[in-house]
Amino acid sequence: MTPHLPAATLLLIACSLVAEGVSASQAVLPIGSASADGILSWKPEKFVGETRYVLDPDAGRPAVRADSVASASGLVREIDVDLEATPVLRWSWKVGNLLEGIDETRKSGDDYPARVYVVFSDGRWWDPRPLSLSYVWSSTQARGSSWPNAYTDRVVMVAVRDATAPLGAWVEERRNVREDIREHFGKEVGSVKAVAIMTDTDNSGQRATAWYGDITFVAE
């Protein structure tokens, strides 16, 4: 069984890493820029092998390139995000290829050329394990579909892009995280505790390349 990001994020929380906050008056909260002191400075989480993350300006556009070869590792930033003030997550990404012959709903196919996690707590002191939304560029599932993660029911996968999206082209995304949590978990959550990116192909043993741009939370 391959561990996945939420468990590692729980470990970070248990280790009491210092989180950064945002006041309710802020309308824009930068999470990570495509720069050496931005996304590349986030905490690495390695599971199987190591996905390589490097700066790779794309036609003059800042970008973090991810290359996975049968590997699973991500970059995590712990930060308190007030979802009342800034509920909308914005980011840009592109992928170079999709994965072939996999079933993303099963452990053997739980691989994605690109994904962005948001991690949160439902506030129950007796169950401190985090919950996560994983926004994915899916190779097999239709855009707009969702399903439980193959390893844990505390993560819901949401296909933001699918196989019909153009490869090698930048796409801008915008998701109301507060509404997505309400829809997929049936919970009212006031804050996000961490954000992460991951390109992984450990279960299928394939290769994948993706690029990530700036990540920001904004008001409605």
Image (spheres, grey):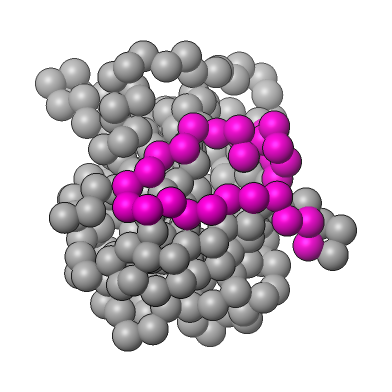
* Residue 35 magenta-highlighted: yes
Residue 170, image x, y percentages: 70, 67
Residue 206, image x, y percentages: 39, 74
Q: Quadrant of residue 41?
A: top right
Which residue appears farthest toward the right when viewing the image? 60
Which sits in the foreground, 204 or 152?
204
Q: Quadrant of residue 124?
A: top left
Q: Which residues are magenta?
A: 30-58
The answer to whether residue 125 shows anywhere in this view is yes
Residue 205, image x, y percentages: 33, 71
Q: Is residue 108 left or right of residue 193?
A: left
Which sits in the foreground, 131 or 186?
131
Q: Quadrant of the N terminus?
A: bottom left
The answer to whether residue 144 shows anywhere in this view is no
Please give the name of the residue rendered at 63% of the width and 57% of the height, measured from the top-left corner: 65
Please give the name of the residue rendered at 51% of the width and 26% of the height, measured from the top-left corner: 79
Please give the name of the residue rendered at 78% of the width and 56% of the height, measured from the top-left corner: 57
Residue 168 versus residue 199 in the image, above or below: below
Which residue appears farthest toward the front when viewing the image? 49
Q: Quadrant of the C terminus?
A: top right
